[in-house]
Each structure stands twice: as C-alpha cells, then as structure tokens.
Image: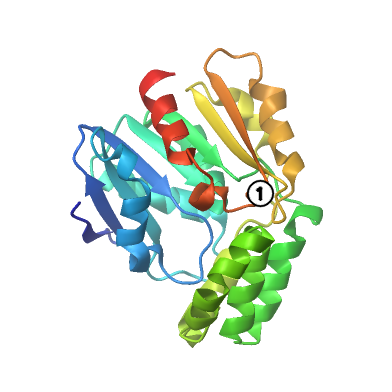
Amino acid sequence: MAVEKKRVGNPRFTMNYFTFGEGDKTFVILPGLSIKPVSDMAKLVADGYSVLHKDFTAYVFDRRSDIPEDYSVFDMARDTAAAIKDLGLKDIYLFGASQGGMMALLITLEHPELVKKLALGSTTAHTCEENSKVIKNWIDIAKTKDGVALYTAFGKAIYPPKTYQEFEGALRLMGSTVTDDEFDRFVTMASAAKDFDVRESLKDIKCPVLVLAPDPDEVLGSDTVDDFRAEFAGREDYRERIYEGYGHAAFDTAPNYKEEILDFFLNA
C-alpha cells in the first residue's frame, strides 16, 4: 500500500501529514504525544491500519511544524481543524489516541459539522495532577536531554512489562537519535494538556462515539473512561471496549483493535 507524505499550510503555520488507503470514506487519525514525528513512522502506521485500506482513505496529522511556546492542546485542535478544512475534508471518521483523543474531542465540539463518527483511544475528558504525574516525569527527563532515559521511561509507562522487554532494544536505539530540537518540542507538547477539561461539554457531542480504554492505564489512569460512561452510557450510538492488560498503548498492540474501529465506523 502506497504512503504519501505531504504538507498543508496557511499564513499561520505548516503541518506535515501523510495519507494511505483507497476507500471513498475519509478517516482522520490524530496520534498521541510522541518524541519523534509520527510522519517518520508513516509506513509502520499504514501497515498497522491495513484492515481499513479498502474502505477508507486515511489522513494522519503531525502537530504543526513550528510549535510556539505555551502551545496548548486547544491550540493543537484549532490548527488541526484548520488543516482539515484547508484540505477540504468533510464527513470524517475521526480517531484520536491519547493526547490526540483530547484534540479529537475539541474538534468534534468546535466543528461538529466535520465529524461523522468519533473514536477515542486511551484518552480522557480532563487532566489533573493525579493523572499527569507520568507525563510530568517525562518532561523532567526530556529537559535533561537524555534520550535513552526518555524513551525507556516512555516505553515502561505505555507498554505492559512483557511488551516493553520486546521493544527495549529498539527504544534505546531510538533514544540515542533524539535531537535538541526534538527534546524541546516534546517538552512543549507534553505540557500542552495542562488544565484540559471538557467534561461539562460532552453532552454537546451528538455524533456516534466509540471509547476504547486500556485497563490498567499507567499514563492517564483507568478511571478516565468513567467520564465518557457517565455521559454517553445508554445512548444507542455509544460503544465501549475495555482492553485488559495491554497498557496505555493498546491502540498499537491489542489484537482486533483496528477491527473494532472498522466495525464501529461501518456498522454502528
């Protein structure tokens, strides 16, 4: 399957993205916090979503190229929505993972006309001191410019122990390649979700919603699904799936995860 790397821009910013798939429906993926740009792993991402290639053309967005200081998740959502509109995308099937899920919530709330269905993976409707401890630790490590320590701390938090052991060598190798600019960019992005809280606005989301939550979630806390359950449970267009034992990065490692998204987008 061909993967095309592209860039969208306007007078305010430029943003890298890539596309894959050959379907007539539009699938937008908003990835979570990452140390390296997601576009560096474009082929790997496309292969991971191969089950959707036939029915969807996917667009995967990085964060904007030139990130300002004090760049919040609200700013990320605003810029990504602008990029989606600049590309003329509409009736999108939107999936956001972790921090990308926060962005997806904001885009759905601010631009409901864009979103046909919404899928949320390993994310939360609000951040607080308790569910930000792991991310604060990552920020502290990133400020020391120790890439191996950052990648290993990142991996230990998002993967269960067995999976981390399988990936440890690759994580250490990746950690040795982190640049000063990538450390600084990571610190800004990791700080972006401070004071994020859309719990009171969830009632305004009218499109069908799928929540995919890991248990346990060592990054955001496994109780984050409670906010979605409290608001959406009982709605016929709400679906929920809990992945036990797969960790925060269940969106990368849990079996049938992409099939669950595909079934929700096509059949729910």
Q: Name the residue nearer the viewer: 100 or 66.
A: 100
* Residue 70 appears in the picture as rendered: no
Q: Is residue 188 left or right of residue 234?
A: left
For the C terminus, the image quarter is: top left
Q: Quadrant of residue 123?
A: top right
Q: Name the residue nearer the viewer: 172 or 213.
A: 172
- Identify the colour scheme used: rainbow
The amino acid marked with disc number 1 is Phe
Residue under pointer 1: 196
Q: Quadrant of residue 213?
A: top right
Instruction: Write the residue at 65% across / 87% down.
Output: 144
Instruction: Write the residue at 51% across / 33% down.
Output: 109
Q: Name the residue nearer the viewer: 139 or 259.
A: 259
Under circle 1, the secondary element is loop
Instruction: Write the residue at 35% across / 60% down.
Output: 44
Q: Is residue 93 left or right of residue 131?
A: left
Q: Is residue 232 above or below residue 236?
A: below
Residue 84 in picture, x, y percent from top left: 32, 45
Residue 229 in picture, x, y percent from top left: 69, 26
Q: Residues within 10 Å of mark 1 (few under 14, many from 20)?
A: some
* Residue 73 appears in the picture as rendered: yes
Residue 53 in picture, x, y percent from top left: 26, 40
Q: Residue furthest right?
A: 130
Instruction: Write the residue at 68% across / 47% down.
Output: 245
Q: Is residue 226 left or right of residue 106?
A: right
Residue 199 in picture, x, y percent from top left: 69, 34
